Image: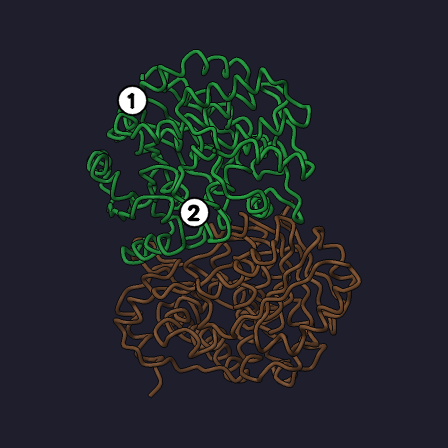
Chain colours: A brown, B green
Amino acid sequence: MITVNVELGERAYPIQIGADLIGQTELFAPHIRGASVTIVTNSTVDPLYGNTLRAALAPLGKDVTTVVLPDGEAHKNWETLNLIFDALLGARADRKTTLIALGGGVIGDMTGFAAACYMRGVPFIQVPTTLLSQVDSSVGGKTGINHPLGKNMIGAFYQPQAVIADIGALRTLPARELAAGLAEVIKTGAIADANFFEWIEANVEALNRCEPQALAEAVKRSCEIKASVVAADEREGGLRAILNFGHTFGHAIEAGLGYGEWLHGEAVGCGMVMAADLSVRLGHLDEAARARLVAVIKAAHLPTQAPMLGASRYVDLMRVDKKAEAGEIKFILLKRFGDTLITRAPDDAVVKTLDASVGT
Amino acid sequence: MITVNVELGERAYPIQIGADLIGQTELFAPHIRGASVTIVTNSTVDPLYGNTLRAALAPLGKDVTTVVLPDGEAHKNWETLNLIFDALLGARADRKTTLIALGGGVIGDMTGFAAACYMRGVPFIQVPTTLLSQVDSSVGGKTGINHPLGKNMIGAFYQPQAVIADIGALRTLPARELAAGLAEVIKTGAIADANFFEWIEANVEALNRCEPQALAEAVKRSCEIKASVVAADEREGGLRAILNFGHTFGHAIEAGLGYGEWLHGEAVGCGMVMAADLSVRLGHLDEAARARLVAVIKAAHLPTQAPMLGASRYVDLMRVDKKAEAGEIKFILLKRFGDTLITRAPDDAVVKTLDASVGT
């Protein structure tokens, strides 16, 4: 087992990475102080890992309840969040009740936001069961839900007590979800670490085959990089924004198609292709680097052609992105592997990128 | 104009107290950095002070929009909160948009919570227009909404940029709302400052008559005391809990009757009578002090007899109070004016207090 520490002063927490961690009582014991625990999971994950987690918690003698939510990004909304509050109040959860998020990014984001808001804040533990949530949404404390007019528009920065990233859980992950997770791994290498990017290029087939050692390394490096960025900028004042590489275009794809049509990671994969196109178009990135990025995104079985929404619809959707300011869209562009810049872009260049990126 | 500073490090903010402050541009100018402002108010307050506030903001050249919510505690729920999010997204509010809460405690709590959650946090300014919100909910950063199973169950600790407490706005306040505000003034003196409690006893008629000097003094002292308690314990780990004197019983009254039937301050007034009864019953407070507290609550035209809900219903409601832990109710009791203790209480004493307190 590997431990990555996220250094955030009094809000610091460990990420434990390894195989078959969900069943290990001793990983949970130090992080649960109150008398009760509420597990929040979904109808896909509960049958796979719910009993393992409940068995791990049993020796701790806590009052354990489970809330099973419907599965999918389409349910990342207030109505579903309220099912968590209903369950907590129904179980008379108090300020020391610990929430455990057992599932992917949607479960993690909603459980974290519920923990942030319930009685103005209760502790929670993340048990991410998808590659995407292990490398991305479990680091950094971003929690929230979608609004019909924008993704993750309502939420909080709220840190977990601990993250238990069980690589073994990825054995049951559909191939499409694995690829979606690789998108964030590729992004992390591209923006922050040229050596890690080269490692991904060399190991993308091993990752596609779900080889445990390659996955553990990918999760560890991604978490380390993201943790160092977040530690430097917890509330996204500046540096942290680089983690949104590929996300400005990606969020527009997700919102434009309707949440849940493309997976978040798929949209980010395609969004990175678009951001790289814009980077080349504005003279920041060379064509060879763009081609390498596109090649590894393709090798990970991610989409590289954007859906046809129309340029004006894309621009409208990007203007309500959280990174936009007074309607000005801020793009995170690549200069070379490991180096980014954040900038506005002329409308005509953006439109050319959109035209060049949509599928035929 | 008087300024009380709430010392919370990087989250410190000033409370400005005085007459006719809503119209003063220079009070708002230093606290609005982005290009746009969204005023959140209700259908009672907007016709009274909306234009004054908009005129004060006009010279700043900001893009100003107004959201008018329905009035009353019964609307302090997710559906109404969502009207704020809809308006913000409709107006393309960004991360630097400032929210201004213009109204009483319900508007302040909902606007603060919306500010805490919108894009994971935007700045907001409180302009409390009721005595209760000037002395209580504008200090301490508690924000939130009600859940059908409990008051303020969903929320956040989130501090405003500034509070502009306009004593002049109290001229239009209904007598019942003024009395509700006095309940928190009385509470503050009772728990924290015997001299201030004596000042209230001597000035309760001037306060009832809405005399500006008496009101300004009451608001100033209440804010100072609450600010010092909150500065010592921002997230209610310990000391801050004393501010809930009268609230354990009070919340049960509000929830039991249905939110909005009694005003919060009325429930707290009666809740203090009940907490004082329990304090005497358990040997912590002498009868003369209890009688003085009841006399000043009566003099402020607050109810001193609790509604008949049945003892078991009261106990059930108090068990889901946020201060309860694993179903154990924690009572804030009075030892003498300026001194409290937090304790569990034997069931039979609680039932006797309930029996003694209900109206006939």
In front here: B62 or A359?
A: B62
Mark nearest the camera among 2 and 1 is: 2
Protein chain holding label 2: B
Residue A28 seen from this side: yes
Protein chain holding label 1: B
Residue drawn 31% across the image and 62% down it: A319
Q: Position of residue A273 (x, y in %)?
A: 43, 76
Asked if A324 appears above or below B224 in the picture, the reply is below
The furthest residue to the bottom: A360
Tag 1's secondary structure? loop
Left or right: where A66 falls relative to A71:
right
Residue drawn 46% across the image and 39% down it: B159
Q: CA distance from mark 2 to mark 1?
A: 35 Å
Residue A140 seen from this side: no
Residues behind callouts 2 and 1 on a single chain: yes
Quadrant location of the C terminus of chain A in the rendered image: bottom left
The furthest residue to the top: B202
Q: Position of residue B299 (x, y in %)?
A: 41, 19
Residue drawn 21% across the image and 34% down it: B52
The tag earlier along the polypeptide, 2 or 1, is 1
Q: Which residue is mark 1?
A: B19
Q: Which residue is mark 2?
A: B258
Q: Local crowd at mark 1 within 10 Å, few (<14), some, or many (≥20)?
A: some
Quarter of the image where one finds residue B78: bottom left
Left or right: where A185 falls relative to A284:
right
Tag 2's secondary structure? loop
Q: Position of residue B164 (x, y in %)?
A: 35, 30
